[in-house]
Amino acid sequence: MSTPADAIPAGTDTLVPSLNGDYRRGVNALWRVLRMALAYRVRFPAAVLAVIGAAIFQLLIPRFLGAAIDHAASMLAVAGGADAAAIAAAKSALIASALLVLGTAVMRGIFTLAHNYLAESIGQSFGYELRLSFFEKLQRLSFGYHDRIHSGDLITRGMLDIEGVRRFIETGIMRLFQLAVLIGLGAYLYMGQDLILGFLCVSFVPFALWRGVVFRLKVRALWREFQERMSVLTRIMEENLAGIRVVRAFSAQRHEMKKFDDWQRRTLEPAINMVRVRYFNTSMMTFSYFVAMGLVLWFGGLRVIDGQITIGELTQFLVFMTVLQMPVRQVGMVINGYARASVSGARMFEILDLEPAIRDRDGAPQLKISEAALAFENVSFSYQGFASEHTVEGISFAVKAGQTLGIVGPPGSGKSTIAHLIPRFYDVTGGRITIDGQDIREVTLDSLRAQVGVVQQDTFLFKTEVRDNVSYGEPGAEDDRVVEAADTAQLHAYVAGLPEGYDTLVGERGLSLSGGQRQRLSIARSVLLAPRVIVFDDSTAAIDAGTELRIREALKELNRSRATIIISHRLSSLMHADEILFLEDGRIVERGTHLELLAQDGPHFGRYRRLFDLQMGAARENAHAR
Amino acid sequence: MPDSAPIRPAAAAPKKLGARGGEEIFAKSVDPRVLMRFFGFLRPYRFMIVISIVAVLIFTLTQIAVPLVIRYVIDTALPAATAGGAAESARAGAVHLLGLAVAVFFAVVLVNYASNYCQQIWVAVTAERVLIDLRRAMYGHLQRVSLSFMDRTQVGQLMSRLQGDVGSLQEFLESSIFAIGDLALLIGIIFVLLAMDLELGLLTLSVVPILVLVRAIWLPAAKRAFVRARETSSIVNSALAENINGVRTVQEMTREGFNFDAFREKAAENLRTHLRATRLAQVMVPTVDTLTGAAMAIVIMVGGNRVLEGTLEIGVVVAFLFYVQRFFDPIRSLTMQYSVMQQAMASGQRIFEVLDVPVEVQDKPEAIDLMKVRGAGDGAVEFRNVTFGYVPGLPILKNVSFSVAPGETVALVGPTGSGKTSTMALLHRFYDIWEGQVLIGGKDVRDLQQESLGRHIAMVLQEPFLFTGSVIDNIRYREESTSREAVERAARAVGAHDFIARLPQGYDTVLGQRGVNLSIGQRQLLSFARAIVVDAGILILDEATASVDSFTERQIQTALEKTLVGRTGLIIAHRLATIRGADRIIVLQEGRIVEQGTHRELLALGGLYHRLHAMNVASFDDLPELTTE
């Protein structure tokens, strides 16, 4: 790809600038996640009911335990316990309490199971939906967008951010309900029983929440800092390993280690700060909890001494506090979940909300092909913000089925840009492109791209068999057609010679193909689709002239029904074309047939001729010598 | 389940790293060798680890102490109020005792707070540092291992070790120390329960074997479900990654719909396996709750009866109830710890597998700095009967001998696979040869410091690899102190200055991911400039101008002629224009030198070179397909 990554093409899928400090977007993201969770109309209320049920049973346990203690204690108070009937009554009361405790515990377990499962199920389904939307969206985002965003960034979003948002449903929204119900209902019940003791039991909650919020605010910034530095470190490691030959060639190991150490240190700093902030706050929370328990013990003890409450009731309050211990420990987790989800959610929605810059106009018709007559009418295009490079201006030409157009010119002169405009990878900024008289922006993308094939310079191989790589554009194409396409691209002999033939795996962990083989595979891919307009974008640079000649021969028959554009540095690839354009700085500076161009000379013309001399000079001189 | 990659002694290190399939997330068993080596990384932090463990134990003790204080309040302080004597003084006595107990309680809480804070911080910080050390060890090792290892190994595979596996050892360290606390808590609770009342203690603890049994049955099934869920996650993620990387091809081929359906299938499977894993995980919740309830019921019934009989104090029953509530936590975390440990073993094996890859190409202890060798700076190069290959028994170069005089420029020509690139690699000692000698400045490269070779040889590689960063930093690369003027001079020399100047921030323009915002030709020019700026005695160009157009190439050609004055040049090329400029041409075929001489000499010879040349093509790419005809 020779498209500038920093350029911002015209269109709407412009990335909203970075998230830095954008608190509001985080809140919006959380709000949206909540609304999306609410859309699970059965599971969500069911989960809420389950969490309330679990909380109620949880809160009943201290009651029954307290009652049991009182049964035992009251009997003790009747000194000597001579009354056999009273003892029998106390014993049966004890059995009843024990059974109640057991039954309540079982119920609590069942409700908790239901809640956890429902919450996880909502979270997972939500993650599934999100993943699909994300996938669907990024497949439709235009080249201009993909040029600008780092693919690693998109992958991180698709993996970690979806995970962060998904987890938030379970650990954020659902846990929050659990906390609210447990603390709210508990406070209500126990303060009703004894205002002061009940109040003391939950007195640590505001403090814990406060620490939690402080923690959240601090960790949010630290987390982002950590992530950013970590991604730099990842990039450094990745580039070092991928470019290990450069590293070795320059004996730059020390330089690379320095870079690595430097960034490791930089990731360590926020990592340790996060640890500090987290544990400082969680220990404070635990501390406040125990302080509250101490106060309950003190004031409750005083009340028992004064005979205002029984020992059983005091036990009840203390056990109530142990019920609160777990949720309070989870406050940190919940808040962490919020912090993560607000960042992740914002990053997710940033992508999901993009409208692809290049999309079908409403009610666009299909492209109707007759002669496959492609015409550029005074086309201009520029990547916003990237001054002159790769810009084209005032390009006009026409080519139709059976004809070949050649484009040549120095790097950065806009050759590939022209290729990319035809299937609407980018939209023109001036003029128009038509196929059989239809403006390509007025027809559906699918029908356009089905008829236009661009064979790229760089070929992306998918981790699958050779067969599937060739038939990538038409999954499930018959084997003989795959072979035919491969044969046309002069790839068949090689593939057939492999032990596993077309079943050979390519890509990571599979067969690695040479540059020339990859380009031939790319040609086969396009040929299989039989597009009516085909563009070879310097796609034979790594193929030797002889093979190229044979490919051209093989394509001859097919080319009668299609318009062909050949972009190349190598004149031998395109000198047979019906028209050749010489591009310089995005403009056509010379045009004509090979012979016409050779005839041109003079200070302002003759670029083509000079190029020809450069490339062929040696050969011709040699021919002369003979 | 295939065997996970075993750790082998350094001598027989694996040729290829084991695949990192989902099934190998867990190692089969505890591997003492992994543990021993892991402990080696802990050595520098042993003091921190010891005091962390002390803090963990103190923390555990305070946790055990809390119910005991409550018991004291219920059994001793409160009854004092009703125990005979004047009501007024009895109350005062009780309040005094209560105050004392609460004071002790607060003291315990303070210690609890301090130890809690310390244990967590110390453990986490130590774990972070160990992580950094492990990653550094691995990364540093990868800088030294032989290139043939790197050639065979996928970057992604190494990255997952540098990130994921290192992380799971970090987690293991953290959770191990906390596990010590859990174990202590468990033992402490058992001890206190039995000490308070043997009979009630034993009865209450009778639920524990049931729990252990249930978990033992549950664990294998749950683990399978978890592993499967992780596998499907990694399948989904790699499908996503591939689609992101290949998105342009996807759009070109209008395969969006098909890919979406395929992805949906994978995502649905992922959803299904995750829900199954959740179901299995959640089954334990009511089980533990039921057992807790049963234990509490036992305490109430048996303990309550004993209280009625007057053989047990109420406070003991209350304390029992507190302990029962806490009892299952450590059991749960300890069984979780087991999974963490298995995972860490698998990760450890993968990490140490990398660390065990032998460094084949090493400096000898007495290796010389090439810069200090007299006369070496002139850059004489000689190959003496060199035989070399990547796979044993399959030599790429066969008995190759040639020499290049200082200042001479030699072009290497030959079909793909004839050994041109290998020849260049050997000069830099990327690999060690099988037979013969490679000499620079009259010294065998094996006797030289590799570092000094890098300073003496500048290479322009076939793949113009650039780093993310500014243009100027890319040209300077290792020589960070190179002046702006020198960088610009180099850029001008290769004809890159014009396009650099047109970039938005000129030389300070930050290149995208490995220079995606430049054309391949432009990337090649930058990589050429990078080689020129170091001012080395020997310049190697490995088909460095393949993707440059003819105009630019001529510019480079002129630059090259200038740069090569007083330097030794070795050029692999396939374009006639490049080749003709050389003082001498060496024609390689199937690892042997078949012809050498000047352009004219070779033409006159009428051999392979002549034949290629006569085909009237401008380039020598992929020659075997031409010659076999």
Image (spheres, coloured by chain):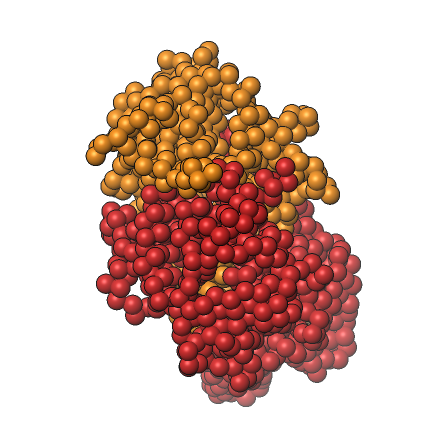
- How many marks the image carries: the answer is 0
| Rendered location of residue A284, percent (x, y) | 43, 71
Q: Residue at x 51, y 77 (%)?
A: B443
- Furthest-top residue in this view: A370
The letter of the red chain is B
| Rendered location of residue B614, percent (x, y) | 51, 40
Choose between A379 and B392: the one closer to the eye. B392
Choose between B259 and B245: the one closer to the eye. B245
Q: Residue at x 40, y 72 (%)?
A: B378
User: Can residue A532 be seen in this snapshot?
Assistant: yes
- Per the rendering, the colour in which chain A appears is orange
User: Can residue B476 be seen in this snapshot?
Assistant: no
- Furthest-left residue in this view: A603
| Rendered location of residue A622, percent (x, y) | 44, 40
Determine which quarter of the picture holds residue B194: bottom right
Q: Residue at x 41, y 34 (%)?
A: A571
Q: Residue at x 68, y 65 (%)?
A: B14
Q: Quadrant of the N terminus of chain A?
A: top left
